[in-house]
Amino acid sequence: MAAPLRLSSLLAGAAGALVAGAGGRGFFDRFVAAGEARDGRPDPLDRYTARAVAEAVAGALAGGAARFAIAHPFDRDPVIPFQRLGRAAGLGGPGPLALQIHPVFGPWWAYRVLIVLDRPLPAAAAPGDGCAGCAAPCVAACPGRAVARTGFEVGACHAHRRADAACRLSCPARLACIRGPEHRYSDEQLAFHMRASLPRPA
Ligand code: B12
Ligand code: SF4
Protein backbone atom coordinates (compact mmCIF):
# COMPACT_ATOMS: atom_id res chain seq x y z
CA MET A 1 0.00 0.00 0.00
CA ALA A 2 1.28 3.48 -0.87
CA ALA A 3 2.24 5.78 1.99
CA PRO A 4 -0.41 8.46 2.73
CA LEU A 5 0.12 11.66 0.81
CA ARG A 6 1.24 14.54 2.99
CA LEU A 7 1.75 18.19 2.09
CA SER A 8 5.37 17.76 3.17
CA SER A 9 5.84 15.20 0.40
CA LEU A 10 5.04 18.01 -2.07
CA LEU A 11 7.12 20.67 -0.27
CA ALA A 12 9.64 20.16 2.52
CA GLY A 13 8.58 22.25 5.51
CA ALA A 14 5.02 22.75 4.21
CA ALA A 15 2.94 24.83 6.62
CA GLY A 16 -0.09 25.99 4.62
CA ALA A 17 -2.06 25.21 1.48
CA LEU A 18 -4.56 26.81 -0.85
CA VAL A 19 -6.97 24.93 -3.14
CA ALA A 20 -8.34 26.96 -6.02
CA GLY A 21 -10.95 26.29 -8.69
CA ALA A 22 -12.68 28.11 -11.51
CA GLY A 23 -16.45 28.58 -11.61
CA GLY A 24 -18.64 29.39 -14.60
CA ARG A 25 -17.53 30.13 -18.14
CA GLY A 26 -14.66 32.63 -17.79
CA PHE A 27 -11.76 30.18 -17.49
CA PHE A 28 -12.83 28.13 -20.50
CA ASP A 29 -13.51 31.24 -22.59
CA ARG A 30 -9.93 32.40 -21.93
CA PHE A 31 -8.65 28.93 -22.83
CA VAL A 32 -10.52 28.97 -26.18
CA ALA A 33 -8.77 32.25 -27.00
CA ALA A 34 -5.33 30.93 -25.99
CA GLY A 35 -2.68 29.34 -28.18
CA GLU A 36 -2.95 25.95 -26.45
CA ALA A 37 -6.50 25.53 -27.82
CA ARG A 38 -5.23 25.60 -31.39
CA ASP A 39 -1.70 24.16 -31.38
CA GLY A 40 -2.84 20.60 -32.14
CA ARG A 41 -0.85 19.10 -29.25
CA PRO A 42 -2.41 16.77 -26.61
CA ASP A 43 -4.06 17.94 -23.37
CA PRO A 44 -4.58 21.58 -24.38
CA LEU A 45 -6.70 22.55 -21.34
CA ASP A 46 -4.23 21.00 -18.90
CA ARG A 47 -1.33 22.84 -20.53
CA TYR A 48 -3.30 26.11 -20.53
CA THR A 49 -4.18 25.59 -16.86
CA ALA A 50 -0.56 24.96 -15.89
CA ARG A 51 0.60 28.11 -17.69
CA ALA A 52 -2.22 30.35 -16.40
CA VAL A 53 -1.71 29.15 -12.83
CA ALA A 54 2.09 29.55 -13.02
CA GLU A 55 1.68 33.13 -14.27
CA ALA A 56 -0.88 33.97 -11.56
CA VAL A 57 1.25 32.49 -8.78
CA ALA A 58 4.40 34.22 -10.04
CA GLY A 59 2.48 37.50 -10.03
CA ALA A 60 0.98 36.99 -6.57
CA LEU A 61 4.22 35.89 -4.92
CA ALA A 62 6.61 38.18 -6.85
CA GLY A 63 9.23 39.76 -4.61
CA GLY A 64 8.33 37.54 -1.66
CA ALA A 65 10.54 34.93 -0.09
CA ALA A 66 7.88 32.22 0.09
CA ARG A 67 8.78 28.73 -1.05
CA PHE A 68 5.91 26.94 -2.71
CA ALA A 69 4.91 23.88 -4.74
CA ILE A 70 2.10 23.57 -7.26
CA ALA A 71 0.02 20.45 -8.02
CA HIS A 72 -2.89 20.04 -10.45
CA PRO A 73 -5.99 17.80 -10.65
CA PHE A 74 -4.58 16.21 -13.82
CA ASP A 75 -1.29 15.19 -12.20
CA ARG A 76 -0.86 11.43 -12.26
CA ASP A 77 2.12 10.87 -9.98
CA PRO A 78 0.89 11.37 -7.40
CA VAL A 79 -2.88 11.74 -7.99
CA ILE A 80 -3.91 14.51 -5.61
CA PRO A 81 -7.31 13.69 -4.04
CA PHE A 82 -8.87 17.07 -4.76
CA GLN A 83 -12.38 16.24 -3.60
CA ARG A 84 -11.01 15.22 -0.23
CA LEU A 85 -9.09 18.50 -0.05
CA GLY A 86 -12.35 20.28 -0.88
CA ARG A 87 -14.10 18.51 1.98
CA ALA A 88 -11.30 19.57 4.30
CA ALA A 89 -11.89 23.15 3.10
CA GLY A 90 -15.60 22.91 3.97
CA LEU A 91 -17.34 21.83 0.76
CA GLY A 92 -19.84 18.99 0.99
CA GLY A 93 -20.32 15.88 -1.08
CA PRO A 94 -19.63 14.48 -3.56
CA GLY A 95 -23.41 14.52 -4.16
CA PRO A 96 -25.55 12.25 -6.36
CA LEU A 97 -23.74 13.47 -9.51
CA ALA A 98 -20.32 12.51 -8.03
CA LEU A 99 -19.55 16.21 -8.08
CA GLN A 100 -19.16 18.53 -5.13
CA ILE A 101 -21.94 21.07 -5.61
CA HIS A 102 -20.85 24.61 -4.80
CA PRO A 103 -23.57 26.74 -3.18
CA VAL A 104 -23.01 29.50 -5.77
CA PHE A 105 -21.60 27.75 -8.86
CA GLY A 106 -23.56 24.50 -8.46
CA PRO A 107 -22.01 21.76 -10.67
CA TRP A 108 -20.43 24.37 -12.98
CA TRP A 109 -16.93 24.59 -11.56
CA ALA A 110 -13.73 22.54 -11.25
CA TYR A 111 -10.54 22.44 -9.24
CA ARG A 112 -7.50 23.91 -10.97
CA VAL A 113 -4.66 23.90 -8.48
CA LEU A 114 -3.27 23.08 -5.05
CA ILE A 115 -0.60 25.52 -3.86
CA VAL A 116 1.49 24.37 -0.91
CA LEU A 117 3.42 27.07 0.98
CA ASP A 118 6.16 27.11 3.56
CA ARG A 119 4.00 29.32 5.82
CA PRO A 120 0.53 29.10 7.37
CA LEU A 121 -2.45 30.82 5.75
CA PRO A 122 -5.57 32.18 7.47
CA ALA A 123 -8.52 29.78 7.21
CA ALA A 124 -11.08 30.79 4.57
CA ALA A 125 -14.83 30.60 5.24
CA ALA A 126 -16.28 27.12 4.56
CA PRO A 127 -18.34 27.25 1.34
CA GLY A 128 -20.86 24.64 2.56
CA ASP A 129 -22.76 21.89 0.74
CA GLY A 130 -24.80 22.94 -2.30
CA CYS A 131 -26.85 19.72 -2.13
CA ALA A 132 -28.09 20.46 1.38
CA GLY A 133 -31.88 20.62 1.51
CA CYS A 134 -32.34 19.76 -2.17
CA ALA A 135 -35.01 17.33 -3.42
CA ALA A 136 -32.46 15.98 -5.95
CA PRO A 137 -34.17 16.38 -9.34
CA CYS A 138 -30.83 15.24 -10.84
CA VAL A 139 -31.70 11.63 -9.85
CA ALA A 140 -34.84 11.35 -12.01
CA ALA A 141 -33.21 13.37 -14.83
CA CYS A 142 -30.51 10.75 -15.48
CA PRO A 143 -31.72 8.41 -18.27
CA GLY A 144 -28.94 5.96 -17.44
CA ARG A 145 -29.99 5.49 -13.79
CA ALA A 146 -26.44 6.33 -12.78
CA VAL A 147 -27.36 9.16 -10.41
CA ALA A 148 -28.63 8.16 -6.97
CA ARG A 149 -28.86 9.62 -3.50
CA THR A 150 -26.71 6.71 -2.38
CA GLY A 151 -23.93 7.48 -4.86
CA PHE A 152 -23.03 7.80 -8.50
CA GLU A 153 -22.66 4.62 -10.62
CA VAL A 154 -19.85 5.45 -13.00
CA GLY A 155 -20.20 2.12 -14.86
CA ALA A 156 -23.93 2.69 -15.55
CA CYS A 157 -23.16 6.22 -16.71
CA HIS A 158 -20.53 5.12 -19.20
CA ALA A 159 -22.62 2.21 -20.52
CA HIS A 160 -25.53 4.56 -21.16
CA ARG A 161 -23.34 7.25 -22.73
CA ARG A 162 -22.03 4.79 -25.30
CA ALA A 163 -25.61 3.98 -26.35
CA ASP A 164 -27.38 7.36 -26.05
CA ALA A 165 -26.25 10.34 -28.11
CA ALA A 166 -28.00 12.75 -25.70
CA CYS A 167 -25.54 11.76 -22.96
CA ARG A 168 -22.39 11.41 -25.03
CA LEU A 169 -21.46 15.09 -25.05
CA SER A 170 -23.89 16.45 -22.49
CA CYS A 171 -25.48 15.41 -19.19
CA PRO A 172 -29.24 15.85 -18.61
CA ALA A 173 -28.77 15.21 -14.89
CA ARG A 174 -26.15 17.92 -14.48
CA LEU A 175 -28.35 20.30 -16.48
CA ALA A 176 -31.22 19.53 -14.07
CA CYS A 177 -29.21 20.62 -11.01
CA ILE A 178 -30.96 23.48 -9.25
CA ARG A 179 -27.79 25.23 -8.04
CA GLY A 180 -25.99 27.93 -10.03
CA PRO A 181 -27.89 27.71 -13.36
CA GLU A 182 -26.65 31.19 -14.25
CA HIS A 183 -23.10 29.76 -14.22
CA ARG A 184 -23.95 26.88 -16.58
CA TYR A 185 -21.17 25.93 -18.99
CA SER A 186 -21.75 26.63 -22.68
CA ASP A 187 -22.66 23.61 -24.79
CA GLU A 188 -19.14 23.79 -26.25
CA GLN A 189 -17.48 23.64 -22.83
CA LEU A 190 -19.74 20.86 -21.61
CA ALA A 191 -19.04 18.83 -24.76
CA PHE A 192 -15.28 19.39 -24.35
CA HIS A 193 -15.30 17.96 -20.80
CA MET A 194 -17.74 15.16 -21.59
CA ARG A 195 -15.67 14.04 -24.57
CA ALA A 196 -12.56 13.94 -22.38
CA SER A 197 -14.28 11.90 -19.66
CA LEU A 198 -15.77 9.15 -21.87
CA PRO A 199 -13.49 6.10 -21.71
CA ARG A 200 -13.05 3.88 -24.76
CA PRO A 201 -15.10 0.66 -24.66
CA ALA A 202 -13.28 -2.22 -22.96
C1 B12 B 1 -10.29 9.75 -12.27
C2 B12 B 1 -11.24 10.90 -12.42
C3 B12 B 1 -12.38 10.71 -13.21
C4 B12 B 1 -12.77 9.38 -13.79
C5 B12 B 1 -13.65 8.63 -12.72
C6 B12 B 1 -13.26 7.19 -12.56
C7 B12 B 1 -14.08 6.54 -11.43
N1 B12 B 1 -14.13 5.26 -11.45
O1 B12 B 1 -14.68 7.18 -10.57
C8 B12 B 1 -13.58 9.81 -15.05
C9 B12 B 1 -12.64 10.01 -16.24
C10 B12 B 1 -14.71 8.89 -15.46
C11 B12 B 1 -14.07 11.19 -14.57
C12 B12 B 1 -15.16 11.81 -15.10
C13 B12 B 1 -15.59 13.07 -14.71
N2 B12 B 1 -15.00 13.91 -13.86
CO1 B12 B 1 -13.46 13.41 -12.87
N3 B12 B 1 -11.79 13.19 -11.95
C14 B12 B 1 -10.99 12.18 -11.82
C15 B12 B 1 -9.74 12.61 -11.02
C16 B12 B 1 -8.63 12.89 -12.02
C17 B12 B 1 -9.25 11.65 -9.96
C18 B12 B 1 -10.36 11.11 -8.99
C19 B12 B 1 -9.77 10.07 -8.10
O2 B12 B 1 -9.72 8.90 -8.41
N4 B12 B 1 -9.28 10.50 -6.97
C20 B12 B 1 -8.66 9.59 -6.04
C21 B12 B 1 -9.44 9.66 -4.73
C22 B12 B 1 -8.71 8.96 -3.60
O3 B12 B 1 -9.49 11.05 -4.47
P1 B12 B 1 -10.80 11.80 -3.89
O4 B12 B 1 -10.60 13.29 -4.04
O5 B12 B 1 -11.07 11.33 -2.56
O6 B12 B 1 -11.99 11.47 -4.97
C23 B12 B 1 -12.92 10.44 -4.78
C24 B12 B 1 -13.76 10.59 -3.56
O7 B12 B 1 -14.36 11.86 -3.54
C25 B12 B 1 -14.70 9.50 -3.76
N5 B12 B 1 -15.94 9.66 -3.02
C26 B12 B 1 -17.11 9.40 -3.53
N6 B12 B 1 -18.05 9.57 -2.62
C27 B12 B 1 -17.47 9.97 -1.50
C28 B12 B 1 -18.03 10.29 -0.27
C29 B12 B 1 -17.18 10.67 0.76
C30 B12 B 1 -17.79 10.97 2.10
C31 B12 B 1 -15.77 10.76 0.55
C32 B12 B 1 -14.87 11.19 1.63
C33 B12 B 1 -15.27 10.44 -0.71
C34 B12 B 1 -16.13 10.04 -1.74
O8 B12 B 1 -14.91 9.47 -5.21
C35 B12 B 1 -14.01 10.39 -5.81
C36 B12 B 1 -13.64 10.00 -7.22
O9 B12 B 1 -13.01 8.72 -7.26
C37 B12 B 1 -10.27 13.92 -10.32
C38 B12 B 1 -9.19 14.98 -10.09
C39 B12 B 1 -8.43 14.73 -8.80
N7 B12 B 1 -7.11 14.68 -8.90
O10 B12 B 1 -9.02 14.59 -7.75
C40 B12 B 1 -11.36 14.40 -11.30
C41 B12 B 1 -12.59 15.08 -10.74
C42 B12 B 1 -13.14 14.27 -9.57
N8 B12 B 1 -13.58 15.00 -11.89
C43 B12 B 1 -14.26 16.03 -12.01
C44 B12 B 1 -15.23 16.19 -13.04
C45 B12 B 1 -15.86 17.58 -13.18
C46 B12 B 1 -15.57 15.13 -13.87
C47 B12 B 1 -16.62 15.17 -14.99
C48 B12 B 1 -17.95 15.81 -14.58
C49 B12 B 1 -16.03 15.85 -16.20
C50 B12 B 1 -17.02 16.51 -17.11
N9 B12 B 1 -17.55 15.75 -18.00
O11 B12 B 1 -17.30 17.70 -16.96
C51 B12 B 1 -16.84 13.68 -15.31
C52 B12 B 1 -18.12 13.17 -14.56
C53 B12 B 1 -18.31 11.75 -14.34
C54 B12 B 1 -18.92 11.06 -15.50
N10 B12 B 1 -20.18 11.27 -15.78
O12 B12 B 1 -18.22 10.31 -16.16
C55 B12 B 1 -13.95 17.09 -10.99
C56 B12 B 1 -15.01 17.18 -9.89
C57 B12 B 1 -15.21 18.62 -9.43
C58 B12 B 1 -16.32 18.73 -8.43
N11 B12 B 1 -17.14 19.76 -8.57
O13 B12 B 1 -16.44 17.92 -7.54
C59 B12 B 1 -12.52 16.62 -10.48
C60 B12 B 1 -12.21 16.92 -9.03
C61 B12 B 1 -11.51 17.31 -11.44
C62 B12 B 1 -11.40 18.82 -11.29
N12 B12 B 1 -10.51 19.43 -12.07
O14 B12 B 1 -12.06 19.47 -10.54
N13 B12 B 1 -13.26 11.68 -13.59
S1 SF4 C 1 -30.01 18.72 -8.16
FE1 SF4 C 1 -29.83 18.96 -5.91
S2 SF4 C 1 -29.08 16.93 -5.09
FE2 SF4 C 1 -28.73 16.96 -7.38
S3 SF4 C 1 -26.58 17.68 -7.57
FE3 SF4 C 1 -27.90 19.54 -7.76
S4 SF4 C 1 -28.06 20.37 -5.64
FE4 SF4 C 1 -27.23 18.24 -5.46
Image (cartoon, rainbow, N blue to C red):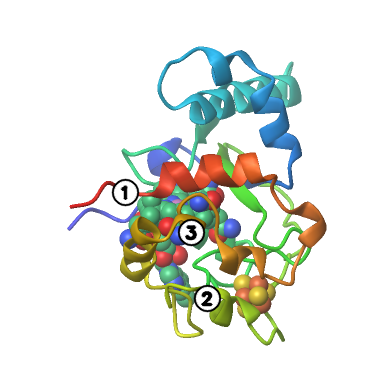
Indicate the amino acid at tag 1: Pro
> What residue would you read off at disc 2?
96
Q: Position of residue 11 (x, y in %)?
A: 45, 35
Q: Considering depth in this image, is 172 or 54 the residue closer to the camera?
A: 172
Residue positioned 74% across, 16% down in the render: 63
Say what amino acid the circle numbered 2 marks. Answer: Pro
Residue at disc 1, secondary structure:
loop
Residue at x 43%, y 41% (from the top left corner): 196
Q: Taking the image as drawn, is residue 116 in sight?
A: yes
Label 1 beta carbon less than 8 Å to ligand 1: yes
Depth check, front residue: 162 or 124:
162
Tell me residue 174's x, y (percent): 60, 64
Q: Toward the viewer: 177 or 64?
A: 177
* Residue type indicated by callout 3: Cys
Disc 2 + disc 1, Cβ < 8 Å: no
Vertical comparison of 95 with 120: above or below: below
Q: Quadrant of the N terminus?
A: bottom left
